[in-house]
Amino acid sequence: MSDFTKMSKEELEALRANLLNEYEDVKSKGISLNMARGKPGPDQLELSMPMMKVLTEDDLLAADGTDCRNYGVLDGLKEAKELVAGMINTSPENLIIYGNSSLNIMYDTVSRSYTHGVLGNTPWCKLDKVKFLCPVPGYDRHFAITEHFGIEMINIPLLSDGPDMDLVEKYVSEDESVKGIWCVPKYANPTGIVYSDQVVKRFAALQPAAKDFRIYWDNAYTVHHLDYEHPAQILDILSECEKAGNPDLVYEFCSTSKVTFPGSGVAALATSKANIADVKKSMTIQTIGHDKINQLRHVKFFKDINGINQHMEAQAKVLCPKFQAVLDVLEEKLAPCNIASWNQPKGGYFISLETIDGCAKKAISMCKDAGLVLTGAGATYPYHKDPKDSNIRIAPSFPLPEELREAAKILVLCVKIAAIDVLLNK
Amino acid sequence: MSDFTKMSKEELEALRANLLNEYEDVKSKGISLNMARGKPGPDQLELSMPMMKVLTEDDLLAADGTDCRNYGVLDGLKEAKELVAGMINTSPENLIIYGNSSLNIMYDTVSRSYTHGVLGNTPWCKLDKVKFLCPVPGYDRHFAITEHFGIEMINIPLLSDGPDMDLVEKYVSEDESVKGIWCVPKYANPTGIVYSDQVVKRFAALQPAAKDFRIYWDNAYTVHHLDYEHPAQILDILSECEKAGNPDLVYEFCSTSKVTFPGSGVAALATSKANIADVKKSMTIQTIGHDKINQLRHVKFFKDINGINQHMEAQAKVLCPKFQAVLDVLEEKLAPCNIASWNQPKGGYFISLETIDGCAKKAISMCKDAGLVLTGAGATYPYHKDPKDSNIRIAPSFPLPEELREAAKILVLCVKIAAIDVLLNK
């Protein structure tokens, strides 16, 4: 079997009939597999189990003597800031440590901008129009936040080294209603791309029409290398912004959700001194403080960034065979057909599969009918509208390698059938 | 020394001179005491220490098999709902379990009403005027939230069995811009009062002009009895509202912050089915879920409401001598002077001292200069404006009994001086 695009109509029809038989066989097996969400597998979670006993009864004081069991410390323990600073190459004083969810920080950041404005600017709820730039394909939960607040989202193509910066610069400098851009700068969700130094510098040098424009820099996969011997490095956006004379331009988010236990991790915001003061005006009304015992638990477990890096290397050893299982099947079964392309991620949680136009929805739906759940079609685009209906996000972290091979085969089968339908209808 | 109000000007002046000498002596000692915040003492926290080892490595599954270490379960573990339901006498299905802070839930609730409206009603940010009723004296952090959102606050006198319901009914039924009322129904902050059954029933039977009026029922001290042999009972507001045909009228908040470790507890919202569905529309955008490991930790530690009640009885045994230390000094040194009154709390965290008009600010300021920090004057009123300048909130939970006796003596001294100044200037 080879290049579909060079096959005759008759060849495609014959192939389609065979593939449909195969599909009916698969369907009859009643399997149940899930490659929908970037969820760590139990084998990864096991690596964090020692954290459950790292705190002892007589050891609940922070380095400065703070009793972590009691109220207080709005913005996080000093040693927790030092730990997280190591993850994203920033200084502890740029950080606020929050609760368990960086998504929640992002939501709060947009919500606060909507209700109270950014650094003294008009609250967005008082404006007729607020827009965000959305590099695509991207993270569905980012888009869900901006959609929830009625913010108009503008697609920006994601190139191999970051968003199309010509377009970003044009929108940001010309349109005062553009207030933000969602970025996943390292091992992007879902494409796995890493922003080049040049892209980061162009971000830092933006000259926004809106004073309250901010870059929403979701550094979710900062330590999540798969190729841990050659970890990707990105420039530190905060210091680049400072150098460029734009110190307040960025909100950077990160967490340990996929480092230790999702739901029981520690999340943080890194930003400028002025932005931190602005955020704290609301934060001090919102809470007395976040879970310091859990902050201390993370500090005692990892000690410092070296501890995190070792831990993430162990995670990579669990994850690599899973990614490879899927990539092997794609390479063997799908590559020859010339109907799709995909990335070879060096980190992060996803493989992004790009089919010929008009296949994604049908392939995902067929997978679902056969018992394989994938991220919903269109999820990687604002408003769930993939304009070319071509992107399929694959999350290989949770299932076992043998399950992933089976799942990838089903996916390939469905993509083939969907592609033949497209080719036949041309 | 006896009734100040019956002394002559000369007697008061002579007494004032003596008290001022005494004050200067106290000041020269350079003490440092704090009765400002309702913060558990280390002796209370010790009671929760076994919680640190209640979870074992092979025991991180919820009853339904959920791996508590991983993502998922937006609204809380079933067994955590059961535990919290026992605290506030409601059904588990009325609950959403959140993170560590009920204050944060309250902020989010107001913020969500502001940005997205309540159950389909106009978001408050689109309205010209939003008002809240504030029973006074009350909790400063409640008032801070409403002030932060530009909500106009209206003082409602707190009577011995709850807010002045005639006034509440009048405002709520006549003014469509009245969207909420802050309530601490049991062992109120700071007065310690407990809402009577009749008051709860009148709340449940309110006929609001605004469809999006809600009662913000902060049941913060639901299990915080001091007189644990005679624990106060209040009616369950949720079922009363349902009986009265107003099922959606109330948001009830509670937490384990002052039960286990403040900052590392579990907080919850209890409300109707329709309100829960409404809240979840935003919540599902805001987070993937809260800390289930910590939920499980609380469940394993307490097992059920009986475990909580036993634990709170042990806490009461720590707290009672502290409250008594302050009350004894007030009774002995202040009662005869006829310049102040105070409550004998049966639960909660505070003693509310009511001086003759015009004394609170001066007395608190003098205490501060002598090294005793109290809750800021006016804090128990919206906009920090105590109209009679007469309320002083005393938080006796953190210091030791001997420190509290010393602190109470200083407070009494300062109140006496401030009162004499008022009497002399009449």
Image: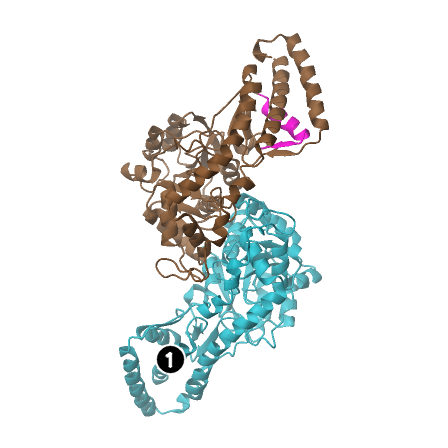
Chain colours: A brown, B cyan
Q: Position of residue A172 (x, y in %)?
A: 38, 33
Tell me, yes or no, if residue A338 can be seen here: no
Looking at the rendered image, the quarter that the C terminus of chain B falls into is bottom left
Measuring 48% from the left and 54% from the top, which residue is drawn there? A53
The part of the chain drawn in magenta is: A358-375
Q: Secondary structure at mark 1?
A: helix
In which quarter of the view is residue B304 placed? bottom right
Measuring 34% from the left and 75% from the top, which residue is drawn there? B367
Q: Nearer the viewer, residue A157 or A73?
A: A73
Chain letter for mark 1, please: B
- Mark 1: amino acid: Glu
Q: Please name the residue that numbered disc 1 is placed on.
A: B406
Q: Position of residue B87 (x, y in %)?
A: 61, 64
Establish if A208 lies above or below A357. below
In which quarter of the view is residue B371 placed? bottom left
Q: Describe residue B137's horizontal placement relative to residue A168 as left or right.
A: right
Q: Is residue A369 magenta?
A: yes
Q: Describe residue A227's horizontal placement relative to residue B132 as left or right.
A: left
